[in-house]
Image (tube, rainbow, N blue to C red):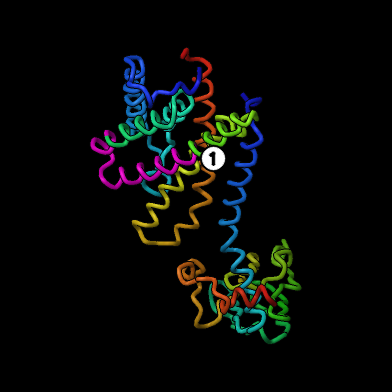
Amino acid sequence: MKNSSINKNPLSVKQLTTFAMLAALAFVLSFLESLIPFQPGLPGIKLGLANLVVVFALFRMDTHAALFINAVRILLAGFLFSGPFGTLYSAAGAAASLASMSLLLRINRKRKQAGKSDLFSILGVSMTGGVFHNLGQLFIAILLLSSLNLVYYFPVMILSGIITGLINGMIAHLLIQALPN
Amino acid sequence: MFKEIKKGDVLLLAAFLAAALLIALSPALRNTLSSHRNHKEENAVLEIRIAGDLYGSYSLSEDQTLEIHSSYGNNTLTISGGTAAMTASDCKNQICIRSGVISKPGQMIVCLPHRLSAEILPPPGEAPDSDTDANSDAGSDSSPYYDAIVR
């Protein structure tokens, strides 16, 4: 029931509405987060609540669905709230995060084909996503500010990524258990 | 939920923490290495101040024992082998004694009851801010850090 393959076949109405709903949800969470005054240090660093939806989509659907939802969210939020640089930050973070998470899921899938159990749970995947989200953003910040000294900010970013990623992973895990397919 | 945790999760967490720790420690590590280099060159300067006024500057390369007397009290500071330590003080809390041996630029011993501070200044011609050399450190074989490791 998990990982129902959708990219090969035309979208069903149910899939289309799920996509749209999750994209809207991710967008709303992005907006909610922009209301929360939580801005430590660098611009563009947030709790990453919208990534919750992405993790959910990644596990319930597939990488393509997660990519689509993320792209819609970033573009919408970019046009409405965060401006060009904010969009660049979130896009870099989202790309790094999604790439790392789908890599872990691919490893899991390969092991499943070989008859082994999963190596990573949703917690580990979400944690990695959180860390790489922050690293992607910091990478852009280093490029934009052309200051290599920001490298010393990496530990902070890694730790905050671990924490927010784990929180998101727990919520996503509960959601996936609670919501009917 | 915690039954869900897989071996890979723990490995990832350990890897991330190790990476964070490594990066966090790298400036400190570099300072340690460069302080060894200072050991060799022994050109760092110890600056002693009492109530903010300069009492004297002493080279860490000259082994000596300083008897520091002021209206606040008496301290004995020993410089030996490129390091400095407060060896005696008639202050109440003896925190200056317990702060041990200092050898790196930026380190200091403070005796608050006697309003005395002894700080190691970076050798002349070297930037005091360790962050500024992050750009220039290419890690080539000729770098002083490499020399310090080899020794």
Depth order, front residue of B37/B72: B37
Q: Residue at x 26, y 45 (%)?
A: A84
Quadrant placement of the C terminus of chain B: bottom right
Depth order, front residue of A73/B107: A73
Depth order, front residue of A114/B5: A114
Say what amino acid the circle numbered 1 marks.
Ile
Does A155 lie within the magenta span? no
Residue B131 in the image, given as x and y percentages of width and height: 49, 66
Task: Using the rendered view, name the quadrant where residue A54 is placed.
Answer: top left
Q: Is B52 above or below relative to B19?
A: below
Task: Using the rendered view, name the quadrant where residue A25 is placed.
Answer: top left
Query: Which segment did they paint magenta?
Result: A76-101
Residue B148 in the image, given as x and y percentages of width and height: 65, 75
Does A92 lie within the magenta span? yes
Residue B107 in the image, given as x and y percentages of width and height: 61, 69
Residue situated furthest top in the rendering: A180
Q: Is residue B119 visible?
A: no
Q: For the residue labelled by badge 1, is the local secondary structure a helix, a strand or a loop?
A: helix
Q: Residue at x 53, y 51 (%)?
A: A155
Badge 1 crowding class, 10 Å Cα cut-off, few under 14, some 14 to 19, many 20 or more, is many
Q: Is B68 above or below relative to B6?
A: below
Is the stretch drawn in magenta largely helix, strand or loop? helix
Q: Is A73 above or below relative to B41?
A: above
**Which residue is tagged 1?**
A162
Left or right placement of residue B1 versus residue A100 in this view: right
Left or right placement of residue A84 versus residue A127 in this view: left
Left or right placement of residue A6 versus residue A78 in this view: right
